[in-house]
Amino acid sequence: MDFFNVKTDSEIIPATPELFAIVDPNLSHNETDSQNQILMFWYNSTIDDNEKLRKIGIIQGINEFTKSFTTNDEQQEQGQQEKVRYIELDNQLILFDIWEDKYQVILSINLTKIKDENAVEFIQNDISPITFLKKLINQGYNEFKLHNGTITKISQTLNSNDFKEFLNNWWIIWLKNLQLEIIENGVMKLYNGFKKSSSYQSITTDLSNLFIFNTNKTNFENYGLIYTNNKLSSQSQISLLNWIEELDNYELLNTQGLILSQVLKTPILTSGQSNGSTQEIVYDPFKLVLNTLSEVSKISGVTAGVNASVNGISSGINTINGYLPNVSRLPEWMGGGGGNGGDVNVEEEARRQGYEPIENAEEHEKYLIGKIDGNIIKKEVWLDNDDDYELKKYNVVVYQKDDLLYLYVLDDFNGDLDDGRYYDELKQKFNEISTQLSIKISENKGFYFLIYDQFHKSIESNLPNIPTFDNEEVNDLKYFHDLTSSKTQSQYLHRELIKILGTITPDQIETLKRTKNGWWILRLLHQGKEILIIKKWSYSNGVSNKTNSVDPIRERIFQNSTSLIGSIGKDAKIWLDDYLTKNKI
């Protein structure tokens, strides 16, 4: 059934998560204690404990059954980096993962259901490809570790009930944020890497574990990391920078967004105006968290994160492993004092209670995490380095100067973090560094590119993020190639890229594909780098869009080309030749 050709009277039920669970089978030894193995469980309706065990048991059984059809070669090909398995049923998609070599993770998704008077059909083409969904699960776990440490470490700190409540609280929020369509930077999520700016450069400084990130999106080629000098492991760098990029995607690069342990993507629908007009979509991170989570103040034993006085966030706010403020100690405007946040205007309530919310003042330079209005706000993260690969607690200072974001990672026991004068000295050093930086906005190209450096785990690209909506002025998407304005066109392209990358074998050094709507995609390997060049051929200006005729000259380009890159165009060929010879764009 074609999704766009269904009858107008058909009932369409969109795809949604049905079940999410984290299970440790080692905690169950017999039927009487089988419930102990369930560490976290969410279902889209209320069920009892026996039904939970039954559903988990059925899914585990299906998973074990399908393993018997996997050959040894296939298992070796998957390797340790691709542990997420999946099962496709008529009406469901089930994904499995293993965390920390013992925690079984299950995500079950109900596929989109289309029902009319004659038939019922389930479709999967309106959600992300399976490889993309796998990456969302991996990204969720990496985000959890960044803010909280490992699940094993937390289990050793909290008692059993508090441990399970902690996991339920965090992952329920994650589920509420989970979007099943292709979003954000799309195909880049398939690569285990971070966004690197084409303006990357060297500077002189005595600060180690420093990252400088360019947030200017005038040209996405310049967006990303422009400098770093650090001893962190590759995975810690990726987790830290991906977190910053995701915050930026949802306009949450502010103090409130940074102190929370999740990027809250879910829009909150505010009540419409009294005349019944359309509801307004706004992002209110605190309201989402405090209305969703149960009381977490009773969880103790792990405190960290934010230290600030009443000028902004009240004195003594704690976070549990950097996760959530202790609700009992929050002012009422943030859900404390026994309140649940309520449907209120956050800033108005803050002032009514005598608190001054942290303002996102449009300053050219300011601390987002650090010394703010005379108070010190801290943010803890869990990272490891290349020496021992053991997750340890660090503090990250975040300073913003124009479009540049300075991330300075320090040991958790650094006593200077409590000294306001230290931040004044750091600010001076950051400003001195800025005088060494020179960022020239790249010219727009007639094609898109992506370069993944497998050694440094960096991604250079001018592919823009997928828009959250379609530009209403775009009437004919078939001939439209501005990905910044067309969500439909952008999602289609990213889906095709994901599909192509999933079918390429390691021995294919150079591959050229053409999509149905005119995108040409060249993929090649060169000295540890994977390069994609993407271009859309326009139809001839002299040919009506209503015909299927294309420019015959362009038709002959591909037929007569002596190389695959020549098929895409002269500009792309010159750019690639320059990169391959100079290893510089």
Image (tube, helix red, strand yellow):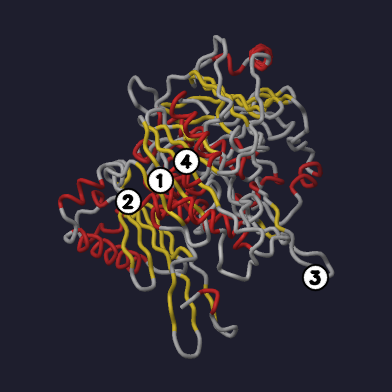
Mark 1 closeness class: few <14, some 14–19, many ≥20 residues within 10 Å: some
What residue is drawn where x is 27% and y is 64%? 57
Mark 4 closeness class: few <14, some 14–19, many ≥20 residues within 10 Å: many
Q: Amino acid at mark 1?
A: Asn
Question: Circle 4 sits in a helix, a strand or a loop, which is it?
Answer: helix
What residue is drawn where x is 44% and y is 44%? 139
Q: Quadrant of residue 271?
A: bottom right
Question: Circle 1 sits in a helix, a strand or a loop, which is it?
Answer: helix
Cβ atoms at labels 2 and 1 below 8 Å apart: yes
Circle 2 or circle 4, nearest the eye: 2
Q: Earlier in the sequence, mark 3 or mark 2?
A: 2
Q: Residue furthest bottom?
A: 117
Q: Amino acid at mark 2?
A: Val
User: Which residue is nearer to you in this view: 432 or 108?
Assistant: 432
Q: Earlier in the sequence, mark 3 or mark 1?
A: 1
Label annotation for residue 276: 3
Cβ atoms at labels 2 and 4 below 8 Å apart: no
